[in-house]
Amino acid sequence: MKSPIRVVISGAAGQIAYNAIFRLLSGDVFGLDQPIHLVMLEVEPALKFLSGVDMEITDCAFPCLAGRTSTCDQLVAFKDADYVILFGAIPRGPGMERKDLLEKNKSIFEAQGKAMQEVAKPETRVLVVGNPANTNALILKKYATKLLPGHITAMSRLDHNRCIGQLAQKFNVTPGQIRNVFILGNHSGTMVPVLCHAELDHKKIIDQIDKEWMKENMQIVRQRGTKVIEARGKSSAASAAEAALDHMHDWYMGTPEGEIVSCSLAAPKDNKYGVPEGIVFSFPCISKNGEWVIQPLDVCEVLKEEIEKTIKDLLDEKKLAFNE
Ligand code: NAX
Protein backbone atom coordinates (compact mmCIF):
# COMPACT_ATOMS: atom_id res chain seq x y z
CA MET A 1 0.00 0.00 0.00
CA LYS A 2 1.12 3.57 -0.80
CA SER A 3 0.96 6.36 1.80
CA PRO A 4 -2.44 8.08 2.00
CA ILE A 5 -3.14 11.19 -0.06
CA ARG A 6 -5.34 14.03 1.24
CA VAL A 7 -8.21 14.78 -1.12
CA VAL A 8 -10.34 17.83 -0.32
CA ILE A 9 -13.88 18.33 -1.59
CA SER A 10 -15.57 21.67 -1.01
CA GLY A 11 -19.34 21.95 -1.21
CA ALA A 12 -19.24 18.39 0.12
CA ALA A 13 -22.93 18.37 1.09
CA GLY A 14 -24.02 19.59 -2.35
CA GLN A 15 -25.46 17.57 -5.20
CA ILE A 16 -22.35 17.20 -7.38
CA ALA A 17 -20.27 16.15 -4.38
CA TYR A 18 -22.88 13.52 -3.47
CA ASN A 19 -22.41 12.03 -6.93
CA ALA A 20 -18.61 12.24 -6.75
CA ILE A 21 -17.56 11.16 -3.26
CA PHE A 22 -18.58 7.51 -3.45
CA ARG A 23 -16.92 6.78 -6.79
CA LEU A 24 -13.84 8.67 -5.62
CA LEU A 25 -13.55 6.42 -2.56
CA SER A 26 -14.27 3.25 -4.53
CA GLY A 27 -10.74 3.34 -5.96
CA ASP A 28 -11.82 4.24 -9.50
CA VAL A 29 -9.94 7.52 -9.61
CA PHE A 30 -6.62 7.06 -7.81
CA GLY A 31 -6.48 3.26 -7.91
CA LEU A 32 -7.35 0.56 -5.37
CA ASP A 33 -3.83 0.62 -3.94
CA GLN A 34 -4.00 4.33 -3.08
CA PRO A 35 -5.42 5.08 0.39
CA ILE A 36 -7.33 8.36 0.64
CA HIS A 37 -7.87 10.70 3.55
CA LEU A 38 -11.03 12.54 2.51
CA VAL A 39 -11.50 16.12 3.71
CA MET A 40 -15.03 17.50 3.32
CA LEU A 41 -15.33 21.28 3.46
CA GLU A 42 -18.70 22.98 3.89
CA VAL A 43 -20.23 26.15 5.27
CA GLU A 44 -21.31 25.84 8.89
CA PRO A 45 -25.11 25.54 8.28
CA ALA A 46 -24.52 22.56 5.96
CA LEU A 47 -22.48 20.51 8.45
CA LYS A 48 -25.63 18.72 9.63
CA PHE A 49 -26.33 17.45 6.08
CA LEU A 50 -22.68 16.55 5.75
CA SER A 51 -22.94 14.32 8.83
CA GLY A 52 -25.44 12.21 6.85
CA VAL A 53 -22.95 11.84 3.98
CA ASP A 54 -20.31 10.93 6.55
CA MET A 55 -22.53 8.12 7.93
CA GLU A 56 -23.05 6.74 4.43
CA ILE A 57 -19.30 6.74 3.82
CA THR A 58 -18.84 4.59 6.94
CA ASP A 59 -21.60 2.28 5.73
CA CYS A 60 -19.81 1.68 2.41
CA ALA A 61 -16.72 0.26 4.19
CA PHE A 62 -14.45 1.44 1.36
CA PRO A 63 -11.21 -0.57 1.45
CA CYS A 64 -9.00 2.42 0.63
CA LEU A 65 -10.52 4.97 3.03
CA ALA A 66 -7.62 5.95 5.30
CA GLY A 67 -9.52 8.60 7.28
CA ARG A 68 -11.78 11.59 6.93
CA THR A 69 -12.37 15.08 8.22
CA SER A 70 -15.51 17.23 8.03
CA THR A 71 -14.86 20.92 8.57
CA CYS A 72 -15.97 24.45 7.84
CA ASP A 73 -12.45 25.77 8.52
CA GLN A 74 -10.52 26.32 5.30
CA LEU A 75 -7.19 26.35 7.13
CA VAL A 76 -7.92 22.84 8.41
CA ALA A 77 -9.20 21.69 5.03
CA PHE A 78 -6.32 22.82 2.83
CA LYS A 79 -3.46 21.94 5.19
CA ASP A 80 -1.14 19.57 3.35
CA ALA A 81 -3.79 18.86 0.71
CA ASP A 82 -2.69 16.81 -2.29
CA TYR A 83 -5.81 17.17 -4.47
CA VAL A 84 -8.61 19.71 -4.07
CA ILE A 85 -11.94 19.76 -5.92
CA LEU A 86 -13.84 23.00 -5.37
CA PHE A 87 -17.53 22.39 -5.99
CA GLY A 88 -18.65 24.86 -3.31
CA ALA A 89 -19.94 28.15 -4.71
CA ILE A 90 -22.99 30.39 -4.59
CA PRO A 91 -25.38 29.44 -7.39
CA ARG A 92 -26.95 32.11 -9.57
CA GLY A 93 -30.29 33.00 -7.95
CA PRO A 94 -33.40 34.63 -9.42
CA GLY A 95 -32.78 38.21 -10.54
CA MET A 96 -29.04 37.86 -9.98
CA GLU A 97 -26.84 39.48 -12.60
CA ARG A 98 -23.59 37.84 -13.73
CA LYS A 99 -21.82 40.70 -11.96
CA ASP A 100 -23.51 39.79 -8.64
CA LEU A 101 -22.58 36.14 -9.10
CA LEU A 102 -18.97 37.09 -9.72
CA GLU A 103 -18.88 39.38 -6.71
CA LYS A 104 -20.30 36.73 -4.37
CA ASN A 105 -17.97 34.05 -5.61
CA LYS A 106 -15.02 36.40 -5.64
CA SER A 107 -15.10 36.54 -1.86
CA ILE A 108 -15.24 32.71 -1.61
CA PHE A 109 -12.32 32.11 -3.96
CA GLU A 110 -10.31 34.99 -2.57
CA ALA A 111 -10.66 33.54 0.94
CA GLN A 112 -9.84 30.03 -0.26
CA GLY A 113 -6.80 31.29 -2.19
CA LYS A 114 -5.52 33.06 0.93
CA ALA A 115 -6.07 29.94 3.04
CA MET A 116 -4.17 27.81 0.50
CA GLN A 117 -1.37 30.37 0.50
CA GLU A 118 -1.09 29.88 4.26
CA VAL A 119 -1.35 26.12 4.65
CA ALA A 120 -1.28 24.25 1.32
CA LYS A 121 1.80 22.82 -0.40
CA PRO A 122 3.11 24.35 -3.65
CA GLU A 123 2.36 21.02 -5.37
CA THR A 124 -1.31 20.92 -4.27
CA ARG A 125 -3.42 20.23 -7.37
CA VAL A 126 -6.71 22.12 -7.60
CA LEU A 127 -9.77 21.72 -9.81
CA VAL A 128 -12.34 24.55 -9.70
CA VAL A 129 -15.87 23.48 -10.64
CA GLY A 130 -18.03 26.16 -8.95
CA ASN A 131 -19.18 28.70 -11.50
CA PRO A 132 -18.03 30.90 -13.11
CA ALA A 133 -15.31 28.24 -12.95
CA ASN A 134 -12.61 29.79 -15.15
CA THR A 135 -12.75 33.18 -13.48
CA ASN A 136 -13.03 31.66 -10.00
CA ALA A 137 -9.80 29.80 -10.77
CA LEU A 138 -8.23 33.07 -11.89
CA ILE A 139 -9.21 34.69 -8.57
CA LEU A 140 -7.83 31.73 -6.62
CA LYS A 141 -4.57 31.93 -8.58
CA LYS A 142 -4.18 35.61 -7.69
CA TYR A 143 -4.13 34.80 -3.97
CA ALA A 144 -2.59 31.31 -3.88
CA THR A 145 0.65 32.43 -5.50
CA LYS A 146 2.69 29.71 -3.82
CA LEU A 147 0.87 27.01 -5.80
CA LEU A 148 2.54 25.96 -9.03
CA PRO A 149 0.65 27.89 -11.76
CA GLY A 150 -0.12 24.73 -13.73
CA HIS A 151 -1.70 23.18 -10.63
CA ILE A 152 -4.73 25.49 -10.58
CA THR A 153 -7.21 24.22 -13.16
CA ALA A 154 -10.90 24.72 -13.96
CA MET A 155 -13.28 22.14 -15.31
CA SER A 156 -14.01 21.92 -19.02
CA ARG A 157 -14.19 18.14 -19.01
CA LEU A 158 -17.99 18.10 -18.79
CA ASP A 159 -18.25 20.10 -22.03
CA HIS A 160 -15.62 17.81 -23.54
CA ASN A 161 -17.59 14.70 -22.54
CA ARG A 162 -20.83 16.22 -23.81
CA CYS A 163 -19.20 16.75 -27.19
CA ILE A 164 -17.99 13.14 -27.30
CA GLY A 165 -21.52 12.00 -26.35
CA GLN A 166 -22.99 13.90 -29.29
CA LEU A 167 -20.49 12.44 -31.76
CA ALA A 168 -21.05 8.91 -30.43
CA GLN A 169 -24.78 9.34 -31.05
CA LYS A 170 -24.22 10.76 -34.52
CA PHE A 171 -21.99 7.87 -35.61
CA ASN A 172 -23.96 5.30 -33.59
CA VAL A 173 -20.85 4.05 -31.76
CA THR A 174 -19.80 3.82 -28.12
CA PRO A 175 -18.27 6.99 -26.63
CA GLY A 176 -15.07 4.99 -26.02
CA GLN A 177 -14.54 4.79 -29.79
CA ILE A 178 -14.42 8.59 -30.10
CA ARG A 179 -11.50 10.72 -28.96
CA ASN A 180 -9.57 13.95 -29.50
CA VAL A 181 -12.38 16.46 -29.57
CA PHE A 182 -11.58 19.47 -27.39
CA ILE A 183 -13.07 22.65 -25.98
CA LEU A 184 -11.46 26.06 -26.31
CA GLY A 185 -12.27 28.99 -24.04
CA ASN A 186 -14.70 29.63 -21.23
CA HIS A 187 -17.17 27.26 -19.55
CA SER A 188 -20.02 29.49 -20.72
CA GLY A 189 -22.23 30.08 -23.73
CA THR A 190 -19.16 31.17 -25.71
CA MET A 191 -17.14 27.95 -25.41
CA VAL A 192 -15.83 26.54 -28.69
CA PRO A 193 -16.06 22.77 -29.27
CA VAL A 194 -13.38 21.79 -31.81
CA LEU A 195 -13.90 18.70 -33.97
CA CYS A 196 -11.06 19.08 -36.52
CA HIS A 197 -8.96 16.39 -34.80
CA ALA A 198 -11.81 14.12 -33.68
CA GLU A 199 -11.19 10.41 -34.24
CA LEU A 200 -13.41 7.35 -34.48
CA ASP A 201 -11.45 4.16 -33.86
CA HIS A 202 -8.23 6.18 -34.26
CA LYS A 203 -9.19 7.58 -37.69
CA LYS A 204 -10.04 11.25 -38.29
CA ILE A 205 -13.69 11.91 -39.03
CA ILE A 206 -13.79 15.61 -39.85
CA ASP A 207 -14.51 14.81 -43.53
CA GLN A 208 -17.71 13.05 -42.44
CA ILE A 209 -19.03 16.02 -40.43
CA ASP A 210 -20.78 18.77 -42.34
CA LYS A 211 -20.75 22.42 -41.30
CA GLU A 212 -24.44 22.43 -40.36
CA TRP A 213 -24.00 19.54 -37.91
CA MET A 214 -20.91 21.22 -36.48
CA LYS A 215 -22.93 24.39 -35.81
CA GLU A 216 -25.78 22.40 -34.28
CA ASN A 217 -23.36 20.48 -32.07
CA MET A 218 -21.82 23.74 -30.88
CA GLN A 219 -25.21 25.00 -29.73
CA ILE A 220 -26.14 21.67 -28.11
CA VAL A 221 -22.93 21.54 -26.09
CA ARG A 222 -23.19 25.22 -25.12
CA GLN A 223 -26.83 24.91 -24.06
CA ARG A 224 -26.66 21.45 -22.48
CA GLY A 225 -26.58 22.67 -18.87
CA THR A 226 -29.68 24.82 -19.39
CA LYS A 227 -31.53 21.97 -21.11
CA VAL A 228 -30.77 19.58 -18.25
CA ILE A 229 -32.13 22.12 -15.75
CA GLU A 230 -35.28 22.58 -17.87
CA ALA A 231 -35.87 18.81 -17.97
CA ARG A 232 -34.75 17.75 -14.50
CA GLY A 233 -35.54 20.84 -12.50
CA LYS A 234 -31.99 20.70 -11.12
CA SER A 235 -28.57 21.29 -12.66
CA SER A 236 -26.34 18.50 -14.01
CA ALA A 237 -24.89 16.65 -11.04
CA ALA A 238 -24.04 13.08 -12.07
CA SER A 239 -22.39 14.12 -15.34
CA ALA A 240 -20.56 16.99 -13.62
CA ALA A 241 -19.27 14.57 -10.96
CA GLU A 242 -18.12 12.08 -13.61
CA ALA A 243 -16.30 14.85 -15.47
CA ALA A 244 -14.55 16.12 -12.32
CA LEU A 245 -13.39 12.58 -11.52
CA ASP A 246 -12.25 11.98 -15.13
CA HIS A 247 -10.16 15.15 -14.79
CA MET A 248 -8.57 13.99 -11.50
CA HIS A 249 -8.06 10.45 -12.79
CA ASP A 250 -6.18 11.66 -15.86
CA TRP A 251 -4.18 14.17 -13.83
CA TYR A 252 -3.03 11.40 -11.49
CA MET A 253 -2.74 8.49 -13.92
CA GLY A 254 -1.84 10.37 -17.14
CA THR A 255 -3.80 10.37 -20.38
CA PRO A 256 -3.49 7.35 -22.67
CA GLU A 257 -0.90 7.65 -25.47
CA GLY A 258 -2.23 9.83 -28.31
CA GLU A 259 -5.33 10.98 -26.41
CA ILE A 260 -6.16 14.65 -25.96
CA VAL A 261 -8.59 15.96 -23.34
CA SER A 262 -9.83 19.43 -22.40
CA CYS A 263 -8.50 21.22 -19.33
CA SER A 264 -8.77 24.88 -18.34
CA LEU A 265 -5.59 26.43 -17.02
CA ALA A 266 -3.69 29.72 -17.07
CA ALA A 267 -2.69 30.62 -20.63
CA PRO A 268 1.09 30.63 -21.05
CA LYS A 269 2.87 33.48 -22.86
CA ASP A 270 2.82 33.25 -26.69
CA ASN A 271 0.49 30.26 -26.87
CA LYS A 272 -0.66 28.84 -30.19
CA TYR A 273 -4.26 30.05 -29.67
CA GLY A 274 -3.55 33.78 -29.19
CA VAL A 275 -4.94 33.77 -25.64
CA PRO A 276 -3.69 36.63 -23.42
CA GLU A 277 -1.23 35.34 -20.84
CA GLY A 278 -2.69 34.35 -17.48
CA ILE A 279 -6.40 34.00 -18.21
CA VAL A 280 -7.79 30.57 -17.34
CA PHE A 281 -8.78 29.09 -20.68
CA SER A 282 -9.75 25.61 -21.85
CA PHE A 283 -7.02 24.05 -24.00
CA PRO A 284 -6.42 20.65 -25.59
CA CYS A 285 -4.04 18.90 -23.20
CA ILE A 286 -2.32 15.68 -22.38
CA SER A 287 -1.39 14.75 -18.83
CA LYS A 288 2.04 13.31 -18.14
CA ASN A 289 3.88 12.75 -14.85
CA GLY A 290 1.23 14.72 -12.97
CA GLU A 291 1.36 17.81 -15.21
CA TRP A 292 -1.03 19.10 -17.88
CA VAL A 293 0.73 19.90 -21.16
CA ILE A 294 -1.07 22.12 -23.68
CA GLN A 295 -1.00 20.75 -27.22
CA PRO A 296 -0.44 23.27 -30.02
CA LEU A 297 -2.97 22.03 -32.59
CA ASP A 298 -4.28 23.68 -35.73
CA VAL A 299 -7.88 24.82 -35.52
CA CYS A 300 -10.31 25.06 -38.46
CA GLU A 301 -10.32 28.60 -39.91
CA VAL A 302 -14.11 28.93 -39.47
CA LEU A 303 -13.72 28.85 -35.68
CA LYS A 304 -11.34 31.82 -35.43
CA GLU A 305 -14.14 34.35 -34.85
CA GLU A 306 -15.71 32.15 -32.14
CA ILE A 307 -12.34 31.88 -30.40
CA GLU A 308 -12.05 35.68 -30.36
CA LYS A 309 -15.50 35.87 -28.73
CA THR A 310 -14.68 33.41 -25.96
CA ILE A 311 -11.40 35.26 -25.25
CA LYS A 312 -13.37 38.51 -24.97
CA ASP A 313 -15.92 36.82 -22.69
CA LEU A 314 -13.14 35.81 -20.27
CA LEU A 315 -11.50 39.25 -20.40
CA ASP A 316 -14.89 40.84 -19.58
CA GLU A 317 -15.35 38.46 -16.62
CA LYS A 318 -11.84 39.31 -15.45
CA LYS A 319 -12.66 43.04 -15.57
CA LEU A 320 -15.83 42.47 -13.54
CA ALA A 321 -14.07 40.24 -11.01
CA PHE A 322 -11.22 42.65 -10.40
CA ASN A 323 -13.19 45.91 -10.92
CA GLU A 324 -10.72 46.87 -13.67
P1 NAX B 1 -25.18 22.70 -4.66
O1 NAX B 1 -25.85 24.01 -4.37
O2 NAX B 1 -25.96 21.43 -4.60
O3 NAX B 1 -23.91 22.53 -3.68
C1 NAX B 1 -23.03 23.55 -3.44
C2 NAX B 1 -22.53 23.35 -2.02
O4 NAX B 1 -21.48 24.28 -1.81
C3 NAX B 1 -23.60 23.61 -0.95
O5 NAX B 1 -23.70 22.48 -0.10
C4 NAX B 1 -23.06 24.85 -0.20
O6 NAX B 1 -23.34 24.79 1.19
C5 NAX B 1 -21.55 24.70 -0.46
N1 NAX B 1 -20.80 25.94 -0.32
C6 NAX B 1 -21.18 27.22 -0.63
N2 NAX B 1 -20.19 28.07 -0.31
C7 NAX B 1 -19.18 27.34 0.18
C8 NAX B 1 -17.90 27.67 0.70
N3 NAX B 1 -17.48 28.93 0.78
N4 NAX B 1 -17.11 26.66 1.14
C9 NAX B 1 -17.53 25.37 1.10
N5 NAX B 1 -18.74 25.01 0.63
C10 NAX B 1 -19.55 25.99 0.18
O7 NAX B 1 -24.49 22.90 -6.09
P2 NAX B 1 -23.96 21.80 -7.08
O8 NAX B 1 -25.04 21.39 -8.01
O9 NAX B 1 -23.22 20.76 -6.33
O10 NAX B 1 -22.95 22.68 -7.98
C11 NAX B 1 -21.76 23.21 -7.46
C12 NAX B 1 -21.16 24.23 -8.42
O11 NAX B 1 -20.80 23.59 -9.64
C13 NAX B 1 -22.11 25.37 -8.83
O12 NAX B 1 -21.40 26.59 -8.76
C14 NAX B 1 -22.46 25.05 -10.27
O13 NAX B 1 -22.77 26.21 -11.00
C15 NAX B 1 -21.16 24.43 -10.73
N6 NAX B 1 -21.19 23.63 -11.96
C16 NAX B 1 -20.09 23.70 -12.75
C17 NAX B 1 -19.98 22.94 -13.89
C18 NAX B 1 -18.74 23.03 -14.74
O14 NAX B 1 -18.68 22.36 -15.79
N7 NAX B 1 -17.74 23.83 -14.39
C19 NAX B 1 -21.08 22.05 -14.34
C20 NAX B 1 -21.99 21.66 -13.24
C21 NAX B 1 -22.31 22.73 -12.23
O15 NAX B 1 -23.39 23.49 -12.69
Image (tube, rainbow, N blue to C red):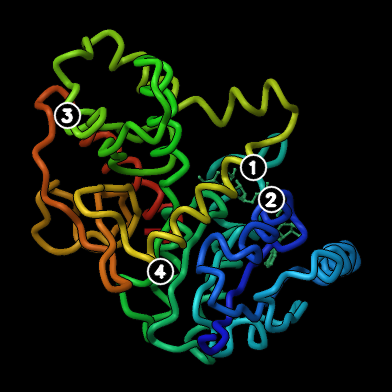
- Which residue matches tag 1? 238
Residue that numbered label 2 is attached to: 19
Where's residue 60, x and y in %? 80, 64
At mark 1, the secondary structure is helix
Query: Considering only vertical position in the picture, is 307 above or below 110?
Result: above
Q: Is mark 4 within 8 Å of ligand 1?
A: no
If you read the primary sequence from the N terminus, does the residue marked by circle 3 or circle 2 appear first?
2
Residue 252: image tag: 4
Front in this rendered view, residue 153 or 248: 248
> Which mark is first along the chain, 1 or 2?
2
- Kindly check if marks 2 and 1 are in contact, taking CB atoms under 8 A apart as contact: yes
Amino acid carrying mark 4 in the image = Tyr
Location of mark 3 (residue): 203
Label 4 – label 1 distance at C-alpha: 21 Å
| Residue 6: x %, y % from top left | 58, 81
Residue 124 appears in the picture as rendered: yes
Of callouts 2 and 4, the N-terminal one: 2
Mark toward the start of the polypeptide (4 vs 3): 3
Residue depth check, mark 4 versus mark 1: number of the one nearer the observer: 4
Q: Residue at x 14, y 16 (%)?
A: 207
Residue 273 location, x and y as percent? Answer: 14, 46
